[in-house]
Amino acid sequence: MPAFVRHPKDFWTGLVFIAFGIAFLLIAQGYPLGSARRMGPAYFPTILSVVLILIGIAATVRSFITPGTPITRFALKPMALIAIGTVAFGILVRGAGVVAAIMALIIISAYSSIHFTWKAAGLLGIGLAAFCVAVFVYGLGLSIPVVGPLLGGG
């Protein structure tokens, strides 16, 4: 690590944010942008990509100013569990419903923490599932099942 980088975690975090922001910005360019009044499919991803790039730039600049601890090791188990939870959500959301998918996501992801407890993960899952059903299914009218056909729902 170069000597002018005072906070390696912020430096690498900033670079990852910038890389993902640029990648998503490039992907979004294949869709029509639209306008603020009539948004196209690329509008929201483009705005999020720019925000992600700006956050990455801020973190990278901060790494040159603020001192911090060096990076010791990567936490592979937590990273893998969070990725597995996200994949499980994607697989379960249509077949088992949004409630089961969110419960799986929360429990698998929470298990990556050293502070994991079944009670906290269960309560967080129930609360987040209720919130997501209220906002996405009833509020926005998305056509995702609350309880999917795999669990006897429709």
Image (spheres, grey):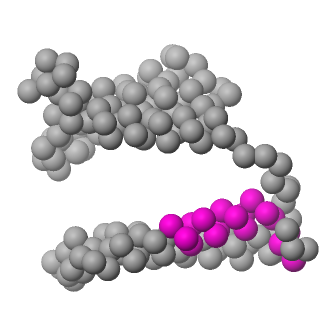
Q: Where is residue 129 in the image (x, y as percent from the top left)?
A: 32, 32
Residue visible at 66% across and 40% down in the picture: 76
Position of residue 84 in the picture relative to residue 136 (left or right): right
State the count of labels. 0
Q: Does the magenta stretch include residue 17?
A: yes
Quadrant for residue 134, please give it.
top left
Q: In this view, does 120 lie above or below 1?
A: above
Residue at image coords 45%, 31%: 106
For this rendering, which residue is in front, 38 or 12?
12
* Residue found at x 72% / y 46%: 74
Magenta highlight range: 4-20
Q: Where is residue 153 in the image (x, y as percent from the top left)?
A: 12, 22
Residue 51 visible in the shown view: no
Q: In which quarter of the image is residue 26?
A: bottom left
Residue drawn at the location 14% of the way across and 25% of the way down: 149
Left or right: 38 in relation to 29: left
Q: Quadrant of the C terminus?
A: top left
Query: In the picture shown, does residue 76 fall above or below 50?
Result: above
Asked where in the image residue 75 lies, by quadrant, the reply is top right
Q: Position of residue 72 (x, y in %)?
A: 83, 49
Q: What percent of the width, then of the height, locates residue 37?
A: 18, 79
For the question of whether residue 32 can be seen, the reply is: yes
Look at the image and tell me in which quarter the N terminus lies: bottom right
Residue 54 included in the magenta stretch of the image: no
- Is 96 left, or right, of 59 in this rendering? left
The residue at the far left in this view is: 154
Q: What secondary structure prevails in the magenta region?
A: helix
